[in-house]
Image (spheres, rainbow, N blue to C red):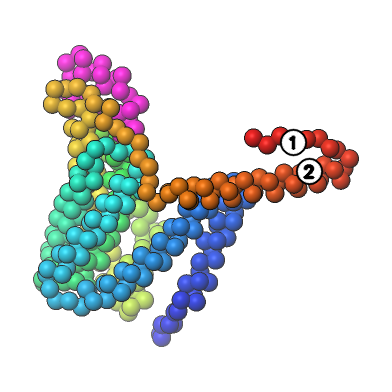
Amino acid sequence: MEQAVLSWWHVLEASTFVFIAAAISMMLGMRIELSLIISGLRCVVQLSLMGYVLDDVLQADNVGVVMLMTLVLVVLGTYEMVFNRTKKTFKGMFPLMFVILFISNCFVGYLGSAFALMEKPFWTPVKFIPIIGMLLGNSMSSIAMATETCLDHVSTHAPLLETRLAYGATRYEATLPLAVDSIRMSLLPIITQLSVMGMINIPGMMTGQLMAGTPMMQAVIYQQVIMFMVAASSVFGVVMAVVACMMILVDKQQILRDDRILDNKPIIRSASVVKLASKIQHLSCYSCFSRRRHHDSSHGNYEVVEMK
């Protein structure tokens, strides 16, 4: 079956769904319309740039180029996770999360590619780079959730932790219940994804292989291997992130250092974006007020509506 050739016009047609969702958000006052539009623009720009770059990288038979591209993906994933995915942070979070993402994803990616998928060499660009991309896309969400949950737990339960430490508990004993809860919560999406795979959810990689003409069972086996790799990288990354956070927030002297927790302001939400959002909200409220005043006057009711 001949595959249809798509163009930028088809991308523009598909983008109307995002604008419809943004319009619904504006009408209901959910205030996520700018986030939807900005994320959609980022998706188009980032995927287009990646398409131009990866076209040359995937054809390069050079381990140095593959490792450099892997390093770039890890840096970009760390940047997105630290500055745009978490509401709380601490000093030195970026290098720490970079090391965690690099170790968890590259280690699992190497083992899966070399042994489970039997790629020779394991760094074959057309396989290794997409695998690293899929591992990063899933694990960074789990690690970001684990980190934020851990920091929230420490902030909320600071008196409880201080009491435990005051009664002689080590930092391992004092933080273990909160750490376990953070790990459980952050891994729930991965567990759910594994449980519905193939029954409700038809994964994207399997769909792409089928569209490319890969036999059904080969596509199924590849997807199963990839999903187990995703689960493994997420578990390793989440555990390392939670342990590192607890060690930073409770020092070697068994003293709680919740003063190290800082509020994180996402870089993507610049001042101009916030001003634009407030202007849109103001115009929306003014439009609603005008319609309300017109409706009241048409019914002989001239009650003044105070806007706050």
Q: Is the magenta stretch mostly helix, strand or loop?
A: helix
Q: Indicate the quadrant containing the N terminus: top left, top right, bottom left or bottom right.
A: bottom left
Q: What stretch is highlighted in magenta?
A: 151-175
Percent x, y of residue 109: 18, 59
Q: On the image, which quarter does residue 161 sit in?
A: top left
Q: Which residue is drawn at 20% across and 62% down?
A: 70
Give the residue pinned by disc 2: 293
Tag 1: amino acid: Val
Residue at the far right: name it.
300
Q: Nearer the N terminus, badge 1 or badge 2?
A: 2
Q: Which residue is drawn at 14% across and 76% down?
A: 61
Percent x, y of residue 81: 31, 49
Q: With respect to residue 61, does 192 lie above or below?
A: above
Report the side of 124 relative to 17 (left or right).
left
Q: How many labels does the image show?
A: 2
Q: With respect to residue 226, does 55 lie above or below?
A: below
